[in-house]
Image: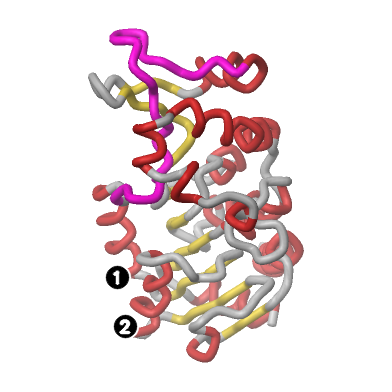
Amino acid sequence: MIKKAASYLKLSNHAVVLTGAGVSTPSGIPDFRSTDDGLWQKYNPMEVASLTAFRTNPEKFYNWFRPMAKLIAEASPNPAHEALAQLEQANYIKEIITQNIDGLHQRAGSEIVHEVHGTLNTLTCGKCYTKYQAEEFMHSYIEEGHIPKCKQCDHYLKPDAILFEEQLPILTWMAVEEAIGKCDLLLVAGSSLEVVPVARLPYAAVSHGAKLIIINHTETYIDSRADIVINQDVADILPLITNELL
């Protein structure tokens, strides 16, 4: 399977990668939906991570999110991130579409990354729409609990990650649709493909003839249409594929 996946990538002209939480869990970042220890097993997302919840009680959101922010700030790219960055630098993959908001792909060296669920790297004021780099607020927030506020109008800043009830970033989504439309191979890594509209992307890819490789711990709805399915840890498998290619 490793050799076959490598050969498909070698022969492709425009390979695209779609990543989910399973790419970041080896870096110590818990996912949201797993049945064992996912965050939504412990919290009602509409109470802590919806747009309504943020607007009505931003303090509650920031208090809930603080431990996760600390984990993300302290996390480092793992072998899966590094392998994908190597594949991009070697021109075997052209673009990465990610459901993750942690920025670890970019920290590993990947350059063309479409963050469909937004990012924690920036914050935006909900009143005057001034945008800030998150790093200037993160230390005092994580270490002392100071909630980020706008320097212009003193309104609460919202992380540019997409909350429940929010629309996806339209320009990013347009770029994603374009990438899927021209890909001849889609590699799904660490995603259970349960969240729409992202879950529909593999179906769109195979519908126009692209090859499909899925590397994920659990089964997905489209495994039967995939050319290769490997139900193992992406941090183990992606480096093996990369080594085979390079």
Q: Nearer the viewer, residue 184 or 89?
A: 184
Locate residue 182, reporting x and y percent: 31, 69
Q: Is residue 146 magenta?
A: yes
In the image, what residue occupies the spot 52% across and 21% down?
135
Q: Which residue: 65% across, 67% down?
A: 245
**Colour setting:** secondary structure
Query: Hey, which quadrant is residue 217 in on the image?
Result: bottom right
189 left or right of 56? right
Which residue type does callout 2 highlight?
A: His
Other-residue count near label 2 (Cα within 10 Å), few / some / many at <14 / 14–19 / ≥20:
few
Q: Is residue 149 above or below residue 174?
A: above
Q: Nearer the viewer, residue 81 or 219?
A: 219
Of residues 97 and 155, the one drawn nearer to the viewer in this rendering: 155
Q: Quadrant of the N terminus?
A: bottom right
Q: Which residue is mark 2?
A: 208
- Which secondary structure class fits the magenta region best? loop
Q: Which residue is mark 1?
A: 181
Name the residue furthest bottom. 224
Residue 151 percent location from the top left of the image: 36, 8
* Residues tagged 1 and 2 counted as in contact (Cβ below 8 A): yes
Q: Position of residue 208 (x, y in %)?
A: 31, 83
Query: Residue at point 33% right, 84% down?
Result: 207
Q: Secondary structure at mark 1?
A: helix
Q: Is residue 176 above or below residue 171?
A: below
- Label 1 crowding class (10 Å Cα cut-off): few <14, some 14-19, many 20+? some
- Give the quadrant of the C terminus: bottom right
- First to last magenta residue range: 145-167
Q: CA distance from mark 1 to mark 2?
A: 8 Å
